[in-house]
Amino acid sequence: MDTNERRHPTRTPPAAARGVHLACPLCGWSDVTGFVLQCPACSGAVEPVVDLDRARVRGHERPELAYLDFLPVDEHDLPPGTFSVATPCRPAPALGAAIGVPGLWVKDESRQPTGTTKDRFAAVVLGVFARLGISTWVAASTGNSSTALAAAVPRDGSVRAHLFCGRDFVAEHRIAVDEHVTLTVVDGTYAEATATARRFAAARGLVWEGGFFNWARREGLKLTYLEAYDEMAAAGVAPDVVVQAISSGMGMMAARKGTDEYLRTGRLAREPRFLMVQQDTCAPMARAWREGRTELTDDDVVTAPDGLGRAILLGDGRATYPYMHRIAADSGGAIVEVSQDDLRTARARLLELEGLDVCHSSAATVASLRNEAMAGRIGRHEVVLVNLTGRHGLARTGMSAAGHGGRAGAR
């Protein structure tokens, strides 16, 4: 366990009200504890296990309250305000016909308040932190995650967030910094910004928010899929294939967790295949999958990732690829890559045929489906759900490095 985790004992264990505990799916370790990011026995990603015997979907406009019974928090833990919204999941017949997937459904997460699916986890992360008495924490992001988290930070002085990013991703952050939220710009990549952020947290005894390994993030993101499954079920269909673009794969890990919970509670009859997509300029996981490898090595790291899909520019996937490989293998899915030209074409088709102005990372899902359908790996009879994770042309808000200009370029 990290030093900064030991310095923050829990105010209330997550299990207090509804039988929640943390567990490691890899080795079976479990405990009722605080903010543990990785299993102390095997270093695997841990998951909260919620008692779902009486779980139900509530009628509420806030997703985290509608699906509260599936989350490791209580209502009073969550910050007040609307940080995510229910988004439409609908058939896309014109686009589906054009790419050879007539049973295409799209989940439009571009409707979220800051424009991306990352808004899904903001209230849940803040709720878990409030439950555990964590008021000051450190995070790193390529933009969307930090933007969502910053939007949820209360401006009452009770929370302080220290955010870090690489210089190439400054423009992706839509954050109004103040005494509650700071943004430190690092002269380097996302990986270097993350390393700097972790050193900052450790040196000051602060909580490292955890990124992919923060189970509270994944709990929030899974609501995208619970909502989509319910919307599809109302139309009498269920997905045979689920598609999402990935960088670390946090969203796909969340999708698998939500799917497992819906299977266990009988709200979903069968598990779909999970198809993950990367772009050809930054595709370490897709290439390892194609070569039949279960792990990435140092040689797989993309040191200066670049490409149209800005939200999926993670060059070092060594820590999370084994989880993605397992999800793809266990479900009969795959991890694939698409070209930059494919991204441009898919994004244009989404706009022209369905009126959806999404980012290139979102369009990667449609690009991959066209390729998979042409290769005969997706049948015309299959129902396919794609998660369009964010919109194109996100508006910027006022921002200055570190809030006071004091730590820009820190290494």
Image (spheres, rainbow, N blue to C red):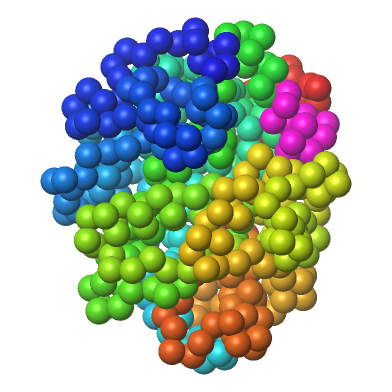
Give the magenta-colored segment's residue range.
Answer: 184-196
Placement of 354 over or under 57, stated as above or below: below
Q: Is residue 190 magenta?
A: yes
> Camera-side residue: 204 or 372?
372
Instruction: Determine the residue positioned at 46% across, 76% down.
Output: 384
In the rendered image, the quadrant that contains the C terminus is top right
In the rendered image, the quadrant that contains the N terminus is top right
**Residue 173 drawn at (x, y percent):** 63, 41
**Residue 360 drawn at (x, y percent):** 66, 65
Instruction: Determine the residue positioned at 56% across, 39% down.
Output: 212
Q: Can residue 134 be seen in this view?
A: yes
Instruction: Determine the residue positioned at 33% across, 22% down.
Output: 32
Q: Can residue 166 be seen in this view?
A: no
Placement of 183 over or under 102, stated as above or below: above
Q: Residue furthest front?
A: 27
Q: Is residue 36 left or right of residue 406?
A: left
> Camera-side residue: 332 or 278?
332
Q: Is residue 398 left or right of residue 16?
A: right
**Residue 49 drawn at (x, y percent):** 32, 37
Instruction: Determine the residue positioned at 42% across, 75% down.
Output: 240
Count of numbered marks? 0
> Camera-side residue: 401 or 143?
143
**Residue 225 drawn at (x, y percent):** 38, 59
Placement of 197 over or under 167, stated as above or below: above
